[in-house]
Image: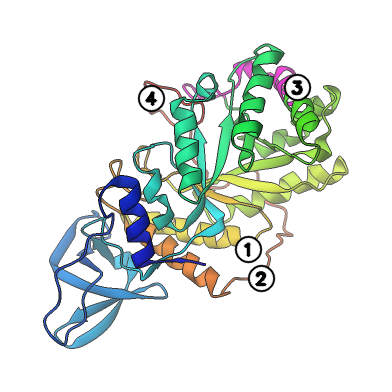
Amino acid sequence: MPLTRREFLRLSSLATGAAFLPNLAPAAEGEPTPRAIGKFIDRSTGQVYGDELLILGVSGYYYLVQTENGVRNYPIETIQTLNPEQFPFDSIVQDKRLGYRCDDARFIYRLPTSGAGINRIAFPSEDLGRGSYFDTAITLAEGSGLRAMIVNNPGFPRDDDYYRARCDFIISQHPGALLELGNEPDNTTEGHVFWQNQDYDTFAHFIKVSQDFLYQKDPNYQPIIGALVDVNNTGKLLTALVTAGVNIGHLQYAVHAYQSIDDLPNRLWRMNQVFKQFKISPQIHCTELGAQYPYLGKGVLLNMVQRAYQTNVESIVIHELFDYFGFGTVSTDWTTAYPIFMQINALVRQLQQGILPPVYQPTAIPTKTHPLAPKPSKTPPPLINNGIN
C-alpha cells in the first residue's frame, strides 16, 4: 500500500524532528491549494524563467498547473520545481524493482520520495562492519522501507577470513539485503580500477570463499556477482569461476548500462549467449543504469528505465541519485530535484496502475560498440575511493 501524504509527513517528522514536506500557504477561498511551485526550464541551459507556476498535482507525465484561464497540463520535463521539500504527487509510491545509488546517510530517509524500493550502497569494504558509517547507511535504508543492495568490493586479494567476516556481517545483521560481490573487476580506467590487475583468478577465489561461507549459513542465498565493464569478458569470467570451484548456477549476475536506450538489451543479449554456452540461466540485476547528459538531456534516462522494465532484469538501479558526475537526478545537496526525478516518479505511478510494456527480448545481433557508449572518464578520482564510482 502506498503511503498517503499525511502518513509520510508523520513518519518523516518522527525520523528527522521536522516535517519533510512543508505545507504551502492556503489558497484563496474556492481555489485549490497547490502542492508545489515551479518555473519553466530552458532546455539548453537548465535555467528557470518566467512567473511562478502553481502545481496542483500530476496526471500521467503532466503537471496540472493553475493558470488565469483554468487548469492546464504541462509536460513534467518542461517545469523545474523550486523547493525540493514540496512534493507534487498526492502520495509516496515505491516500486520494489527500482533502485537508486545513495550513500549519503543524511538523505536516505528522503529516498522513498524518489519512487525507489532499493538503495544501492557502497563504501570501502574495510568499513563493512557493525557500527560503521556503512552499517548506519544500511540500517537507515532498511528503516525507511528500502531494501539495501550492499556492495562488498575488497578491491584486491585479501585473506579468506577477511572475505568470510564481511559476508558474516551482512547475512547476520542485514539478512534481507541483496549482497553484490565485487564491481567491474575488468575496469582498466585510471582511478576506477576496482580489482587489482584485473586478475580473474584472484577475483574468482574471492567469489569461491564468499559463496561457500554464505551457502553454509543459508543454502538458498545467492549473492550477485558485480558487473563487467565489457560483457564480452563474460566467458572469461565464468571460466575462471568454474576453475576456482564456484557453483556458477547458484549465483545472480549484474550488468551496467549507460547513455542509450539500447545499451541494456544489447548487453543482456550478449550475456545470455554466453550463459547458454555454460548451461545456466541466472537472474540478472541491472545495478547501474545511467545517462551522463546535462539539463533536459537527462530525459533519455526515463526512456532507458522504461526500456529496462521491458526486460527480465530483477532490479533496475539508477546510477546515481546525486549529480556528482553528471548522472544524478537531484543536485549534490538535494536543493534541486531535476525534472527527470519527477518523471521517474510518474513512471512508478504508471507501473502501479499496471501500465507496463510487454517483456522485450532482443533478437538482433548487437554491435560491439554503441556510438553513444560512454568514453573513459578523465575526471580525477574522489578523495575517498568508495570502490564503485
Residue 264, compared with residue 179, is above or below; it is below
Amino acid on which the number 3 mark rests in the picture: Val
Judged by depth in the image, the label closer to the viewer, 4 or 3, is 3
Give the percent coordinates (x, y) of residue 357.
61, 71
Nearer to the camera, 34 or 287: 34
Per the image, the residue denoted by label 2 is 358
Per the image, the residue denoted by label 4 is 382
Residue at position x 38%, y 28% from top?
379
159 relative to 336 in the view: left or right? right
Per the image, the residue denoted by label 3 is 209
Q: Residues within 10 Å of mark 4 (few under 14, many from 20)?
A: few
Which mark is first along the chain, 2 or 4? 2
**For the view shown, which residue lies furthest in the top direction?**
159
Amino acid on which the number 4 mark rests in the picture: Pro
Which mark is first along the chain, 2 or 1? 1
Which mark is first along the chain, 1 or 4? 1
Nearer to the camera, 215 or 371: 215
> Magenta stretch: residue 207 in it?
yes
Question: What's the distance in space between the residues labelled 1 and 3, CA to CA?
Answer: 35 Å
**Labels 1 & 2 near each other (Cβ < 8 A):** yes
The numbered mark at residue 296 is none
Which residues are drawn in magenta?
A: 188-209
Per the image, the residue denoted by label 1 is 310
Question: What's the distance in space between the residues labelled 4 and 2, CA to CA?
Answer: 41 Å
Splitting the image into 4 quarters, where does residue 140 fall? top left
Q: Secondary structure at mark 4?
A: loop
Give the percent coordinates (x, y) of residue 297.
37, 55
Which mark is first along the chain, 3 or 1? 3
Q: Residues within 10 Å of mark 1 (few under 14, many from 20)?
A: some
Q: Secondary structure at mark 1?
A: loop
